C-alpha cells in the first residue's frame, strides 16, 4: 500500500507536517526512512501486506495529543483518500473509521431512478416495457438491509413527462446526498452532433435537439449542488450510453464535477439489449442479480468496478454488449454495497479485534488525563452544592466531548426530554442532526444512540440551510427553530423529513444572522409554542449593553395548526448577555437561560419569567419607545458562575471553570425534595481547542 499524507493550512500546515514526520520517524511500526531535511510537501511511504492501519491510527492520535493542531490532514492510501480534521485526529475510532474503506452511509445517500418506458406514436421510438420493472427491482435491491439498506424515502423513482420533471429530481437528489448519490437512467438514448440526449415520451428521432434532454444538462444539475456528494455513480441503461463519457470528461476538466463514476450499458454506436425473458433488459437484469446475490471469492463489499467486471462477463452471454465505464476520480475502487457471497475469512469493515483492547485502553487513558467521560460531583465529595437558594449543581459530564456518531458529537444547541431516561440533543451541524441520549443514573453518563439527519421539504433548500438552535418535541414530530432563514419547521421524528413550517411575523429577517431564533419551547398541553430571538431586530436595538429582543407565542387552533399571527412580548436581557433558551412552565411562566462571553469567560444566568401582566407588543414597530410596563417581568434564579467548580477543567479563561458556552436546556424529572431536574449542554462550536461539549445536571425550585 502506498500512503501519502499532506497538510492543508499554508505555512502552519507545513510546520505541522514536519512535526508529524519527526513523530512518525520515531515510531518503529511506521515504515518511514529518516528525512534528510525539514522541507517537505508530503509524507510518503510504502507498506507491506502485513502492515496494519491500527499502527498509523495510534501514531496519528498520539501525535495529535502531543501538540495543538489546526491543520486538516489528507491521507491517500492507493486510491482511497480521506481528510482528517484536528477533531477527528483526537479520536482514534473516528480516525480508524475514516482510514478504512467503508460502505456509503444510507441515511446520507440518495438514489434517483429515472425511467421512460412509453412514447407517443409519432416519436418513432418503440416502447420499452422493461424500464418500469427495472426501476422497481433496483429500488428493492438497494433498499435491502443486507445489501445496502437505502431508506425508501431516499430512493425516488421518476417517470418524467417533460424536461423539468427529469432534471429537477436530479438536482433535489444532489442536494440531499452528502455521501453517495446514485443516478440511474433507463430509456432511449439518442445522439446529436456526438452528444447523448435522453428521450422523453414525446421526443422524436427526427428532432433530437428540440425534443430530448441533453445529458450535459443532467451533469450540470449535479455540479450545481452547493455541497456535492462524496461520490456520484451514474448508471445508463440505454443505447449509445458511452457517448456520455466525453461530456463527463469536459465537466470534470472544468472542475464542475468531481468524484463521479459512469457505468454505461453500451459502447458508442452500440445498442443495449431490450426485454429478456425476465421482463428486464439484459444490462439491468445482470446489475440487479449481481448486487442482490453478490460475487463469490471476493471481499465483504463490492466496488462499482467489481460490479462492472461481473456485468462484462454476464451481459454478452445474454446477447448484449459489454458495459463500459468511466472513472476519472477512482470512485470505482471504493466500497459500494455489501457482498452477500463474500469469501470466508475476509476482513469486515470494523476495528480489528486484536486492537480493540488497546484502543479502549488508550481512550480510557485519555479520559483519565483530561478528566472527561464520567460525571464529576456527588453529594459525598463536596464537589456539588448550591448555586443559589433555588438552584443546585448535581454534577457534570464531559463524556459527549469524546464521543463519535460516527463523527464527533458537537455543536449541541438544544435538548428535549422524551422519556424517563432519554433526551434528544440537537446539533447545529450542516446538515443538522438529532442525537438520542440515554442517561445512566448510576454514573450519570449520557450514552449516544443513532443520529437522525434533518432534511428539508423545499426543493430549493438543502439540509445545510438549517441552522438548528431550538427544539420542541410535538408528538411524533419535532419542531426546530433555525437561525438560518430564520424559520420554524416541523420534522418527522422517525426519519427527519420536514412535514411542515410555521409562519414568522414580517421583519424577523432584519436581524443579525447569528442572533436569530435561538430558543423554542412547547407547553405541556402542546397548545402554546414559544420562540425567542437571541438578539434584537435591527429596529429594536439595545440600550446600555442590554439587548431588546422579542418572544413569540403561538396558540394552536382546534385543527392543530399554529396561528399565523403570534403574540409578541418585549424582553430585555442583562448586560452583555443574550437570550439562549426558553422552557414553557405552567401559568404563563417561562424559564429563561441567558448567556454571553466576555474576556474573563462565560456568564450564564437563569431567570423565571411571567407573561401574565405583559402586553402583546406585536403592533410596535420598534421596542425603543415602549413603556416600562411593557417588558416581560423576570426574576433571577441563579448566576451559574456561583456554582461549585466541581473540579472541572477549562480550555479557555473562565471565572468558574465549570462554565462553557451553554446553549441547550431541558426540564427533567421531579426530585425527592420537590425540585425539578434541569439538564444543560454547552455548544463547543466545533472548537475543540478552546471549548467543551459539557453536559450538566442541576436541581431547580420552580415554585
Image (cartoon, rainbow, N blue to C red):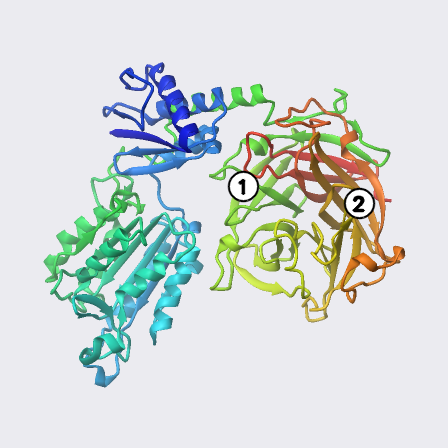
- Would you say residue 524 is visible in this rendering? no
Lateral position of residue 573 relative to residue 371, left or right: right
- Observer-nearest of 324 and 81: 81
Indicate the position of residue 308 as horizontal and vertical percent values: 20, 51
Residue 81 lies in quadrant: top left
Lateral position of residue 681 relative to residue 325, left or right: right
- Residue lying at 36% horizontally and 66% vertically, measured from the top left: 157
The secondary element bearing badge 1 is classed as: strand
Indicate the position of residue 260 as horizontal and vertical percent values: 29, 51
On screen, residue 243 above or below 440: below
On screen, residue 146 above or below 361: below
Q: Quadrant of the N terminus?
A: top left
**Label 2 neighbour load within 10 Å: few <14, some 14-19, many 20+:** few
Indicate the position of residue 45 as horizontal and vertical percent values: 26, 24
- Residue lying at 13% horizontally and 66% vertically, measured from the top left: 271
- Residue lying at 22% horizontally and 82% vertically, measured from the top left: 123
Residue, far bottom: 122
Indicate the position of residue 681 as horizontal and vertical percent values: 65, 38
- Observer-nearest of 606 and 678: 606
Q: Are marks 2 and 1 in contact (CB under 8 Å)?
A: no
Which label was assigned to residue 544?
2
**Label 1 neighbour load within 10 Å: few <14, some 14-19, many 20+:** few
- Would you say residue 106 is visible in this rendering? yes
Q: Quadrant of the C terminus?
A: top right
Residue 662 lies in quadrant: top right
User: Which is nearer the N-term, disc 2 or disc 1?
Assistant: 1
Lateral position of residue 438 relative to residue 9, left or right: right
On screen, residue 114 above or below 433: below
Q: Nearer the viewer, mark 2 or mark 1?
A: 2
Q: Which residue is mark 1?
A: 449
Q: CA distance from mark 2 to mark 1?
A: 45 Å
The secondary element bearing badge 2 is classed as: loop
Amino acid at each position: 500500500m502506498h500512503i501519502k499524507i499532506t497538510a492543508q493550512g499554508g505555512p502552519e500546515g507545513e510546520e505541522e507536517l514536519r512535526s508529524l514526520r519527526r513523530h512518525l520517524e520515531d515510531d518503529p511500526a511506521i515504515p518511514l526512512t529518516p528525512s534528510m531535511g525539514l522541507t517537505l510537501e508530503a509524507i510518503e511511504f510504502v507498506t507491506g501486506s502485513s502492515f496494519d492501519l491500527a499502527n498509523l491510527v495510534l501514531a496519528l492520535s498520539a501525535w495529535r495529543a502531543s501538540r495543538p493542531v489546526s491543520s486538516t490532514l489528507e491521507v491517500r492510501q492507493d486510491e482511497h483518500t480521506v481528510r482528517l480534521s484536528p477533531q477527528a485526529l483526537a479520536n482514534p475510532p473516528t480516525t480508524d473509521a475514516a482510514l478504512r474503506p467503508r460502505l456509503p452511509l444510507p441515511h446520507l445517500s440518495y438514489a434517483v431512478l429515472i425511467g421512460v418506458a412509453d412514447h407517443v406514436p409519432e416519436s418513432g421510438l418503440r416502447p420499452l416495457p422493461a424500464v418500469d420493472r427495472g426501476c422497481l427491482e433496483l429500488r428493492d435491491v438497494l433498499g435491502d438491509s443486507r445489501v445496502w439498506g437505502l431508506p425508501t424515502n431516499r430512493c425516488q423513482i421518476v417517470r418524467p413527462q417533460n424536461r423539468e420533471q427529469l432534471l429537477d429530481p436530479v438536482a433535489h437528489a444532489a442536494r440531499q446526498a452528502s455521501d453517495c448519490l446514485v443516478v440511474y437512467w433507463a430509456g432511449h438514448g439518442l445522439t446529436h452532433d456526438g452528444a447523448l440526449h435522453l428521450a422523453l415520451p414525446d421526443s422524436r428521432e427526427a428532432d433530437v435537439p428540440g425534443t430530448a434532454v441533453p445529458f450535459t444538462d443532467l451533469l450540470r444539475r449535479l455540479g450545481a449542488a452547493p455541497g456535492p456528494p462524496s461520490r456520484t455513480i451514474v448508471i445508463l441503461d440505454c443505447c449509445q450510453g458511452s457517448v456520455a463519457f466525453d461530456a463527463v470528461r469536459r465537466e470534470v476538466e472544468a472542475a464542475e464535477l468531481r468524484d463521479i463514476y459512469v457505468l454505461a450499458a453500451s459502447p458508442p454506436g452500440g445498442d443495449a439489449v431490450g426485454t429478456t425473458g425476465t421482463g428486464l433488459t439484459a444490462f439491468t437484469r445482470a446489475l440487479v442479480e449481481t448486487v442482490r446475490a453478490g460475487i463469490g471469492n471476493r471481499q465483504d463489499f463490492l466496488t462499482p468496478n467489481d460490479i462492472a467486471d461481473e456485468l462484462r462477463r454476464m451481459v454478452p452471454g445474454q446477447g448484449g454488449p459489454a458495459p463500459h465505464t468511466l472513472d476519472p476520480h477512482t470512485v470505482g475502487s471504493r466500497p459500494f454495497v455489501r457482498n452477500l457471497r463474500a469469501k470466508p475469512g475476509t476482513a469486515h469493515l470494523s476495528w480489528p479485534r486484536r486492537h480493540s483492547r488497546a484502543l479502549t485502553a488508550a481512550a480510557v487513558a485519555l479520559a483519565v488525563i483530561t478528566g472527561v467521560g464520567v460525571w464529576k460531583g456527588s453529594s459525598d465529595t463536596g464537589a456539588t452544592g448550591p448555586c443559589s437558594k433555588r438552584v443546585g449543581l448535581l454534577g457534570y459530564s464531559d463524556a459527549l466531548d469524546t464521543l463519535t456518531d460516527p463523527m464527533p458529537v458537537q455543536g449541541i444547541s438544544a435538548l428535549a426530554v422524551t422519556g424517563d431516561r432519554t433526551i434528544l440533543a440537537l446539533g447545529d451541524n450542516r446538515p443538522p442532526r438529532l442525537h438520542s441520549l440515554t442517561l445512566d443514573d448510576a454514573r450519570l453518563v449520557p450514552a449516544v444512540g443513532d443520529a437522525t439527519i434533518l432534511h428539508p421539504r423545499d426543493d430549493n433548500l438543502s439540509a445545510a440551510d438549517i441552522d438548528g438552535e431550538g427544539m420542541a418535541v410535538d408528538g411524533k414530530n419535532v419542531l426546530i427553530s433555525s437561525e438560518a432563514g430564520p424559520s420554524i419547521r416541523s420534522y418527522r421524528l422517525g426519519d427527519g423529513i420536514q412535514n411542515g413550517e410555521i409562519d414568522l411575523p414580517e421583519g424577523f429577517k432584519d436581524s443579525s444572522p447569528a442572533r436569530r431564533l435561538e430558543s423554542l419551547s412547547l407547553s405541556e398541553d402542546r397548545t402554546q409554542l414559544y420562540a425567542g430571538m437571541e438578539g434584537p431586530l435591527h429596529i429594536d436595538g439595545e440600550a446600555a449593553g442590554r439587548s431588546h429582543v422579542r418572544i413569540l407565542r403561538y396558540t394552536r387552533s382546534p385543527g392543530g395548526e399554529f396561528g399565523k399571527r403570534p403574540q409578541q412580548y418585549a424582553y430585555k436581557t442583562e448586560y452583555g448577555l443574550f437570550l439562549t433558551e426558553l422552557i414553557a412552565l405552567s401559568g404563563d411562566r417561562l424559564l429563561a437561560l441567558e448567556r454571553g462571553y466576555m474576556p474573563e469567560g462565560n456568564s450564564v444566568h437563569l431567570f423565571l419569567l411571567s407573561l401574565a401582566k405583559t402586553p402583546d407588543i406585536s403592533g410596535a414597530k420598534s421596542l425603543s419607545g415602549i413603556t416600562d410596563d411593557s417588558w416581560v417581568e423576570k426574576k433571577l434564579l441563579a448566576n451559574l458562575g456561583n456554582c461549585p467548580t466541581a473540579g472541572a477543567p477549562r480550555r479557555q479563561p473562565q471565572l468558574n471553570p465549570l462554565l462553557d458556552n451553554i446553549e441547550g436546556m431541558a426540564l427533567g424529572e421531579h426530585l425527592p425534595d420537590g425540585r425539578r431536574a434541569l439538564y444543560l449542554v454547552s455548544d463547543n462550536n466545533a472548537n475543540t481547542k478552546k471549548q467543551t461539549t459539557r453536559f450538566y445536571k442541576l436541581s431547580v425550585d420552580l415554585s
